[in-house]
Image (tube, rainbow, N blue to C red):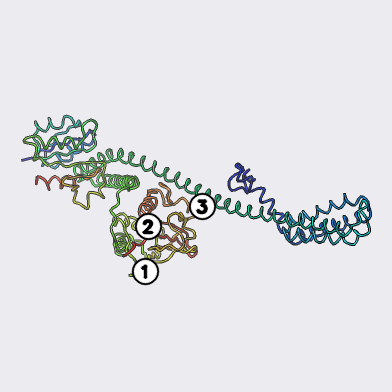
Amino acid sequence: MKKRILVVDDEAGLTHMVKRGLEATGKFVVMEENEGGRAVAVAREFKPDLVILDVMMPEVDGATVAAELAETKDLKHVPVIFLTAIITSQETEPTGSYIGSHTFLAKPVQLKNLISCIDKHIGA
Amino acid sequence: MGSPTEGYPLGRTGKMTEAYEYSTLLEKWRNPKGWNAVAVILFIALFIASVAVLVYVTGGTAFVWINMMYIPIIVAAASYRVLGGFAAALAGGLALGPFMPLHVFEGVSQDFANWSIRSGCFMLVGTVTGYLFTWIDRQYDILKRAYDQLALSHQELQDTQLELIQAEKLESIGRLAAGVAHEVKNPLAVVQLGLDYLSMAVSENEEVAQAIEEMDTAVKKADRVVKGLVDYSRFERLDLKAQALNPIIEEALNLVRHEIIKERIVVESRLSPAISPVAVDRGKIQQVFINLFINGIHAMEGGGKLAVGTSNYVLTEESLRGFSVPPSRFAPGDDVVGVDITDTGTGVPADKIGKLFDPFFTTKPVGKGTGLGLSVSRKILELHDGWIGIKNREEKGIQVTILLKPMKGV
């Protein structure tokens, strides 16, 4: 069964590319969302196995979305991968992408690294 | 053409400079030597002799001419202070001695008494004037010391101001760079993911795959530049720990081993086992060494020698020469842990060496350097309270010197 991935980023080009890249593997079904404020509502409906979240978004940022997801029944255990431009791969690589208890990937990320990170969390 | 304030370290405004100008004028008249001394002494002697002759010749009106004797006495006191004033007064008195008895002033017959009083007055004026000039000398010395001190402080203030302007300039470049980096990373991420997707979709077409690979390389290069910008813009957080420098250097050399072998570089390592530990952020200092080794390797394409040495030493004027180290950071006599890295490469043209640490300045061919490596390195060193300087070697290539403060009490 294909894993369901929700990707939230205000950059539509990026969410399209993540969707194309992940779905091309045949292992994932991807839902795109470009507004942080709508992310939780979409997640409730889509019921993702994993959420890819941008950190810096206008209006509602990634950290707020993650906090709301954690407080939402049925979504609180859904793993979140932060995909962000505010850190560099130099900072994420030595810690195996973990900063604190969260997973961070630095933009620009390679598709294979994104897939292996998703696999690590939900074993697709 | 010189500037209007040339020769006046504090400019031409202010009482201090005005007073200084008068004192320098005074200084010119202090203890004349050589031909000036001959001219002054001759003038005094002739003047004394002339007055004496006038007194002798004019007789009755000698009283008026005698007062002229004060002129050479004052000139002598101004030139040679108390000694000069006293000597001229003595000479004036003695010059008048033979003539005085020949004249009886206005019926006064006490020639000797009159001469004695006159000579006494000469002595008094000569000595007092000499003392006055000595007092002015002392005031001048005090003023000069204060002025020199002020000029030094003024220079230091100007240097600090320049450093501040430079720091502010770098700071704004850093802020700008951070913003640009963030904005560039998003489209770069789209391109990277798009290329990865395309390479999966068209893997069977070799020509397309080749084009995608080239684009992928270009994205990675752009990403390196962006990383450099981010590095440059945020070094506020340092994880300082007591570290031995030699293993960090060895590790950095190991990380660039591939490049060293590829370019047929010979590495000469002179790492002193006795160097003091230093408080550094291991990752950031290692980044500095990697930058420097890569620069050295790029300067010696086709082979050469990269030498790296560490040692504990005391700074001297000689060891600081050519590295433009700010005196507020390191001065002769300071204990340092020093790292010297030399290469036998092309060196840096003299007119460019001062710009090496400016952001985005590079001497490398287009596409090979971002122009941020050395500015990031200097920033890292500055945050460590250290310094990095570069100079051309007389033999060939360049010498990079890193100075760090040894940890006290270790």
x, y percent for residue B116: 83, 59
The disc at residue B292 is: 2
- Among the two numbered marks 3 and 2 on one chain, the one whose residue lies closer to the N terminus: 2
Mark in front: 2 vs 1: 1
In-front residue for pair B382/B253: B382
The correct choice, above or below, for A2 with respect to B379 in the image is above
x, y percent for residue B91: 82, 61
Tell me if mark 1 has few (under 14), some (14-19) or many (20+) residues whose alpha carbon lies within 10 angstroms of its own: some
x, y percent for residue B23: 66, 50
Q: Please, what is the three-letter code of the amino acid marked with disc 1?
A: Arg
The disc at residue B394 is: none
Mark in front: 1 vs 3: 1
Q: Please, what is the three-letter code of the amino acid marked with disc 2?
A: Leu
Residue highlighted by disc 1: B270
x, y percent for residue B359: 41, 47
Classify residue B345 by image quadrant: bottom left
User: Spatial distance from mark 3 to mark 2, Cα to Cα?
Assistant: 20 Å
| Same chain for the residues under marks 2 and 1 in the image | yes
The disc at residue B351 is: 3
In-front residue for pair B131/B221: B131
Q: Is residue B43 left or right of residue B240?
A: right
- Among the two numbered marks 2 and 1 on one chain, the one whose residue lies closer to the N terminus: 1
Q: Secondary structure at mark 1?
A: strand
Tell me if mark 2 has few (under 14), some (14-19) or many (20+) residues whose alpha carbon lies within 10 angstroms of its own: some
